[in-house]
Image (spheres, rainbow, N blue to C red):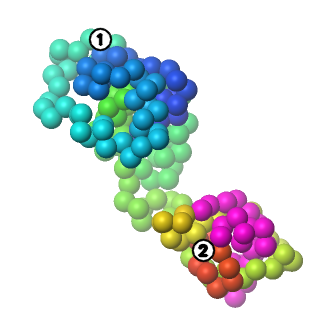
């Protein structure tokens, strides 16, 4: 995850893209960004430079962007750090910003969640809002909805069950 991903989607450009990446991809910044968001991004790997890029040879603006979080991405970076992500030592090919990584089981949201069987009841008592998600990657869905945990079951309303695409006794992940 790059810390300036949010700013990339605004249609702006970046000094790193203009000074370095555009030479390899030969696309306008906004077009490359659109392609990454709408495809699997394989073209990024196919066209990426195969050899080191000597920082001394790139312009000052591009050089100054390397490893720096864009101001539009600072809130996202802070959230990722709170979740347990740390710098990977790599930079993003679009804007030169830092990328972060974390082992899945070290992510706070993962550690704080529980996987429970579903019970469906529109009158679940003392329900509290929580992040609910399915457990299957292929049909992943997530919502914020009220849930009560009763007898190791996630008791959710019919609307929440419909939005998640689950039925009674399916497994869901609950993060309160």
Q: Residue at x 15, y 22 (%)?
A: 54
Q: Which residue is drawn at 50% across and 53% down?
A: 83
Outermost top residue:
60
Question: Which type of secondary structure does the marked residue at label 1 adopt?
Answer: helix
Left or right of residue 22, residue 144 in this image: right
Q: Label 1 belongs to which residue?
A: 60
Residue 34 or 78: which is nearer the viewer? 34
How far separated are the C-alphas under marks 2 and 1? Answer: 50 Å
Residue segment shown in magenta:
141-165
Q: Where is residue 11 in the image (x, y as percent from the top left)?
A: 52, 24
Q: Give the class, few, some or many, for how many residues have Cα within 10 Å of label 1's Cα (few <14, many ≥20).
A: few
Q: Is residue 147 highlighted in magenta?
A: yes
Q: Are circles 2 and 1 on residues that touch, CB within 8 Å?
A: no
86 versus 176 height, above or below = above
Quarter assignment of residue 93: top left
Residue 10 or 77: which is nearer the viewer? 10
Q: Decide which of tag 2 and tag 1 comes sooner along the chain.
A: 1
Q: Which residue is drawn at 41% across and 23% down?
A: 29
Outermost bottom residue:
151
Q: Is residue 14 highlighted in magenta?
A: no
Can residue 57 be seen at all in this image of the molecule? Answer: yes
Q: Label 2 belongs to which residue?
A: 172
């Amino acid at each position: 995850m790059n810390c300036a991903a949010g700013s990339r989607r605004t249609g702006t450009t970046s000094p790193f893209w203009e000074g370095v990446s555009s030479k390899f991809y030969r696309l306008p910044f906004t077009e490359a960004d659109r392609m990454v968001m709408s495809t699997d991004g394989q073209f990024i790997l196919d066209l990426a430079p195969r050899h080191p890029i000597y920082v001394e040879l790139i312009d000052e603006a591009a050089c100054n962007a390397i490893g720096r979080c864009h101001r539009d991405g600072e809130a996202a970076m802070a959230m990722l750090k709170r979740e347990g992500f740390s710098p990977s030592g790599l930079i993003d090919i679009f804007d030169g910003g830092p990328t972060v990584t974390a082992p899945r089981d070290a992510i706070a949201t993962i550690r704080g969640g529980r996987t429970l069987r579903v019970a469906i009841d529109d009158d679940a008592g003392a329900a509290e809002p929580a992040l609910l998600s399915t457990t299957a990657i292929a049909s992943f869905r997530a919502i914020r909805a009220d849930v009560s945990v009763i007898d190791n079951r996630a008791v959710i309303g019919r609307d929440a069950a419909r939005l998640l695409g689950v039925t009674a006794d399916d497994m869901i992940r609950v993060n309160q």
